[in-house]
């Protein structure tokens, strides 16, 4: 499938790599292609510059966000939470409408330092804000409750026996995303309900951040035992 | 040990029952003893009136909140979240200070119907508010992320192989609470850190509520797989 990914950070890269391995045709979108390729320093998270990564992942093409949107039959928001809404609203709706948008971004607020709080919580969520801003896009919130390594290769932990959550208004869209998640190795996929249930998975992040501190590693995930 | 429990609902009762079985001397506190004993109808959650329950649990004594506080060497807040702070502030501090207070209450806001949102979240928590209001009490937040049956008998699910979280400022208090949790059957106890980490476990409740809806049963719990 043709897939467009918004965001050149570690989440976007991990997904692009995995999707390419699975035979998909991936374009990653960025705001300014020339600026992204010109960077020679690691980013704030210590990831190597995009150009270095792309040398090892030549099958993945880089384009503007508009170009990635135009390319994708399915779209993935792997941009940071704070910039996601403005980024998506900068893309011509004709290249978004009718498509599935997997939203991985979390509304993390780092303005008060670490650990982050949320800049949307409780009675709203980033997933809902994106769905309201783009009513003709099929937003499916998922993959936002574990680190990038586990997102694309859940079998690294407990033979994959941990849980991933799905939220979205369209049953058909969630079925397609479920199929994609299964191709990554996800076995325990819980459909929480409509897009308002994104509140639940996004509000897991403060606990996630504290667990990272308590456990000393981000290589953990949640299993809903039942 | 002498234990005082605030709250006559299903959480307070489940804990009183379990603690009595374990040989502890338990007093449950309520605002108005006569009114609590006079009730003949099930409560809003369908629990039988307290007097019916007490007939089968005669070892548990009922007193005012002040009486339960005076009795307890260790205290447990099993009152509802909305009333917890005012209830605790109504008790003479001399009967609280220096003691461990296990806080199980969640700041659930039912004013907009079901599922509940939180009336404190993100940059504060009920656990922190109670600790700030009672600086000489050793508040330990725990037991607030599963239903009352699992709180006191985790082995009902997956042989007890699921996770319980602890938050609190006092290492010694958390060690004593850990010992109590082990006596209930808890094996996987994660100390998240100081009382500010209550934000994380309280913010798990919106996901918990949606999972109850999606799974059709409250008999589930979270395992932190690592």
Image: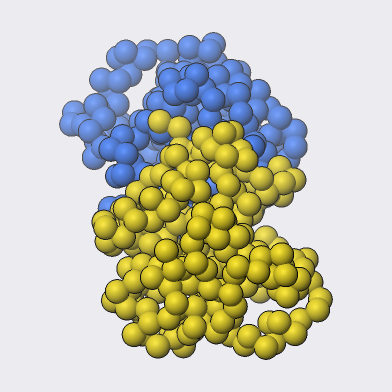
Chain colours: A blue, B yellow
Pick whichever, A25 or B22, lies toward us: B22
Judge whether A49 appears above or below A102 on screen: above
Q: Position of residue A148 (x, y in %)?
A: 41, 30
Judged left or right of residue A43, residue B129 is right
**Residue lying farthest to the right in this orientation:** B41
Judge whether B164 appears above or below A149 on screen: below
Q: Position of residue A139 (x, y in %)?
A: 62, 42
Residue at the spot 31% in from the left edge and 44% down from the top edge:
A214
Residue at the spot 32% in from the left edge and 78% down from the top edge:
B97
Judged left or right of residue A39, residue B61 is right
Residue at the spot 42% in from the left edge and 64% down from the top edge:
B1
Q: Position of residue B46 (x, y in %)?
A: 78, 66
Give the quadrant of the C terminus of chain A. Answer: top right
Pick whichever, B30 or A222, lies toward us: B30
Residue at the spot 28% in from the left edge and 62% down from the top edge:
B169
Judge whether A156 appears above or below B199 on screen: above
Which of the 4 quarters of the picture holds residue A39? top left
Give the quadrant of the N terminus of chain A. Answer: top right
Q: Position of residue B90 (x, y in %)?
A: 46, 88
Residue A89: tell me if it is visible. Answer: no
């Amino acid at each position: 499938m043709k897939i467009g990914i918004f965001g050149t950070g570690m989440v976007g890269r991990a997904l692009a790599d995995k999707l390419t391995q699975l035979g998909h045709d991936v374009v990653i979108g960025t705001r300014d292609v020339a600026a992204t390729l010109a960077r020679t320093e690691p980013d704030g998270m210590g990831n190597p510059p995009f150009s270095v990564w792309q040398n090892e992942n030549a099958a993945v093409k880089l384009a503007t966000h508009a170009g990635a949107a135009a390319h994708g039959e399915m779209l993935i928001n792997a941009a940071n939470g704070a910039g996601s809404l403005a980024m998506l609203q900068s893309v011509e709706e004709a290249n978004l409408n009718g498509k599935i948008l997997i939203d991985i971004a979390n509304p993390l607020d780092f303005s008060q330092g670490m650990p982050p709080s949320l800049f949307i919580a409780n009675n709203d969520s980033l997933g809902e804000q994106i769905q309201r801003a783009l009513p003709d896009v099929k937003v499916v919130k998922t993959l936002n409750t574990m680190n990038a390594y586990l997102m694309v290769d859940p079998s690294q932990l407990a033979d994959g026996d941990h849980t991933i959550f799905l939220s979205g208004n369209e049953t058909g869209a969630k079925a397609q995303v479920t199929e994609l998640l299964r191709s990554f190795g996800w076995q325990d996929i819980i459909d929480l309900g409509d897009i308002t249930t994104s509140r639940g998975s996004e509000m897991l992040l403060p606990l996630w951040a504290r667990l990272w501190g308590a456990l000393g590693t981000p290589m953990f995930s949640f299993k809903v035992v039942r």
